[in-house]
């Protein structure tokens, strides 16, 4: 019974809505018909008024034309009468016979004047008719306007009734919909807005992620092409050096002469040069050991001069050291000038050129620092030309980036900050100073030149064959890389690949989710950067693999 009652109620509601819609449609149709009839009456009244006005205008124009013609004739008659009167006055004595003719003409003139008066009367009558027509037109226009106002009022009333009926129908429909849905209109709107916002947010997130992936992929391709082209176009030879110089001897007997009586020669040599002279069981050679490469080179040249001269005693050692110092300074100046000329950097201070030449004897992980600076400048210039940056400025920044290594044995601090301070004191541009200070991220790079200097430095230092390290250090670094990664929760296996420049981390899929892999990669990379010292860059890749298996029996 309740179901039947609800069905009857719904049917009654539907019938009511339909009746309301029919009433609304009939009211709208009647209002439209009344509006059409009113518009037709107004248009007809306007047409009749326009026709009467046009006829009145034509009649007025005809009357005016007739009046102008009559006035012209009267004026012509007056002129002729005056001329004739003058002629009669002149001929009055001898023209008595023509007086009758003058009288006749005078009568004709009076007749013309009478006709003119009649014409004026007709014009005034026509003007009166025109005025009557204008008043009739005004009256009809007022009647038409009154009829239009009445029609507009009726249309407005019909429209208001139609809107009221539509509002009542919409209100009834909205109440019924709210009753059926169990929600108010505000709640339904809020739910719809929330749903649309959530959908738009998801679509925006997908679009942003797609754009970021495309931009990252295109950027990596362009950067890879630029770096590969720069490295391929710059082919610099690398010479492996160390902190020990080997000086060959003509015979083993020279070892005793180098040592001297009670070791005075070797003590004098080490005191003058500041270099350790190592005489061991190595046949036909002695070793020179010193952390300062320039001092070690001076000692090598000094020892070679002593061996060539054959006289080895304290006085000769001091003289030979003075000559070797002058020779090494000359070679240093020439090496700096040649490097500057090869790179094409001009306008450097003479003191900077001399300091640059000293880096000829400095090595870093077996890589000659001066050769590294020249190679870095060429690589940076190629990159700058590819992306449209000032090539000269970028080349200058890259060439001077490691100049601080020439003074690390004399000045406290990192070579980047020492080099930046040195460049600033010798008048270099602030962009060059900033690139030198930021090339190892001791300060954040703020210019394109600083970023290109970093990239070129990494390319020169990290390419295969550029640098070397001891086997023990290499193995220790690889073990430490694997230990750092294995210390994280959920890591199953770790593989250090590509000479320790690529670390692959395999995680357990039930302990680490997809979002956790990215976080783990960042954490491992940050820990490696904090705890290890290494040339170039190390890439950390976290791999999560999920497998599902089932057995059919």
Image (spheres, rainbow, N blue to C red):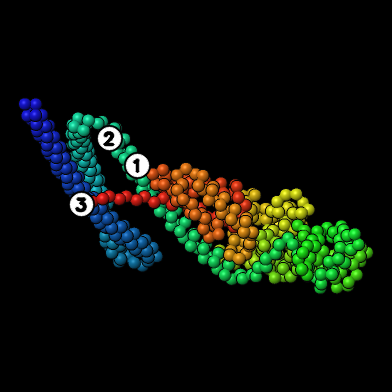
Say which of 294 and 400 sits in front: 294
Tell whether label 1 touches label 2 (CB within 8 Å): no
Q: Residues within 10 Å of mark 3 (few under 14, many from 20)?
A: few
Q: Position of residue 422 (x, y in %)?
A: 75, 55
The residue beneath circle 2 is 188
- 247 vs 274, nearest the viewer: 247
Which image quarter holds the N terminus? top left
Quarter of the image holding residue 365? bottom right
Residue behind mark 1: 198
Between disc 1 and disc 3, whose residue precedes? 3
Q: Are marks 1 and 3 in contact (CB under 8 Å)?
A: no
Q: Is residue 245 left or right of residue 389?
A: right
Name which of mark 2 and mark 3 comes first in the sequence.
Answer: 3
Q: Is residue 466 left or right of residue 221?
A: right
> Dot 1, crowdedness within 10 Å: few (<14), some or many (≥20)?
few
Front position among marks 2 and 3: 2
Q: Quadrant of residue 426?
A: bottom right
Q: Give the SS element for disc 3.
A: helix
Residues under labels 2 and 3: Cα distance?
62 Å
Can residue 196 be seen here? The reply is yes
In the rendered structure, the answer to whether residue 76 lies left or right of residue 325 reads: left
Rate crowding at label 2 as few (under 14), some (14 to 19) or many (20 or more) other CA atoms within 10 Å: some
Label 2 vs 1, first from the N-terminus: 2
Q: CA distance from mark 1 to mark 3?
A: 68 Å
The residue sitting at 55% across, 57% down in the picture is 500
Residue 161 visible? The answer is: no
**On the image, numbered disc 3 is attached to which residue?**
51
């Amino acid at each position: 019974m309740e179901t039947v009652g609800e069905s009857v109620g719904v049917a009654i509601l539907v019938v009511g809505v339909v009746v309301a819609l029919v009433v609304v449609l009939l009211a709208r149709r009647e209002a439209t018909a009344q509006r059409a009839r009113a518009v037709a009456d107004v248009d007809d009244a306007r047409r009749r008024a326009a026709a009467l006005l046009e006829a009145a205008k034509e009649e007025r124009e005809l009357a005016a034309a007739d009046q102008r013609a009559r006035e012209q004739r009267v004026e012509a008659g007056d002129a002729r009468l005056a001329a004739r009167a003058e002629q009669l006055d002149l001929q009055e004595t001898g023209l008595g016979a023509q007086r009758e003719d003058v009288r006749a003409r005078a009568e004709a003139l009076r007749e013309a004047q009478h006709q003119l008066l009649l014409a004026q009367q007709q014009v005034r009558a026509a003007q009166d008719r025109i005025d009557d027509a204008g008043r009739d037109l005004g009256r009809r226009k007022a009647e038409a306007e009154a009829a239009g106002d009445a029609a507009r009022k009726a249309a407005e009333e019909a429209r208001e009734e139609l809107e009221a009926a539509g509002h009542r129908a919409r209100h009834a429909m909205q109440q019924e919909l709210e009753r059926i849905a169990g929600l108010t209109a505000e709640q339904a709107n809020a739910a719809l807005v929330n749903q649309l916002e959530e959908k738009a947010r998801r679509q925006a997130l997908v679009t942003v992620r797609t754009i970021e992936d495309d931009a990252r992929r295109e950027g990596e391709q362009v950067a890879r092409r630029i770096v590969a082209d720069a490295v391929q176009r710059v082919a610099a030879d690398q010479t492996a050096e160390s902190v020990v110089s080997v000086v060959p001897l003509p015979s083993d007997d020279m070892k005793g002469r180098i040592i001297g009586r009670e070791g005075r020669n070797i003590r004098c040599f080490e005191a003058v040069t500041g270099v350790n002279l190592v005489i061991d069981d190595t046949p036909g050679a002695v070793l020179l050991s010193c952390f300062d490469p320039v001092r070690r080179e001076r000692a090598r040249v000094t020892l070679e001069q002593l061996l060539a001269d054959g006289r080895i005693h304290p006085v000769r050692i001091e003289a030979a050291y003075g000559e070797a110092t002058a020779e090494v300074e000359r070679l240093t100046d020439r090496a700096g000038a040649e490097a500057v000329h090869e790179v094409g950097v001009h306008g450097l201070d003479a003191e900077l050129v001399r300091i640059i030449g000293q880096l000829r004897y400095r090595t870093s992980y077996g890589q000659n620092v001066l050769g590294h600076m020249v190679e870095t400048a060429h690589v940076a210039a190629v990159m700058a030309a590819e992306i449209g940056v000032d090539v000269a400025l970028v080349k200058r920044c890259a060439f001077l980036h490691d100049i601080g290594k020439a003074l690390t044995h004399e000045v406290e601090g990192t070579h980047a900050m020492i080099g930046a301070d040195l460049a600033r004191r010798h008048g270099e541009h602030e962009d060059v100073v900033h690139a030198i200070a930021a090339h190892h991220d001791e300060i954040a790079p703020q210019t394109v030149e600083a970023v290109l200097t970093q990239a070129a430095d990494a390319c020169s230092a990290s390419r295969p064959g550029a640098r070397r390290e001891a086997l023990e250090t290499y193995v220790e670094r690889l073990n430490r890389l694997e230990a750092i990664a294995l210390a994280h929760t959920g890591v199953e296996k770790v593989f250090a690949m590509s000479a320790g420049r690529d670390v692959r981390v395999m995680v357990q899929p039930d302990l680490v989710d997809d979002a956790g892999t990215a976080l783990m990669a960042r954490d491992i990379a940050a820990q490696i950067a904090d705890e290890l010292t290494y040339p170039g860059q190390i890439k950390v890749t976290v791999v999560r693999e999920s497998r599902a298996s089932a057995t059919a029996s």
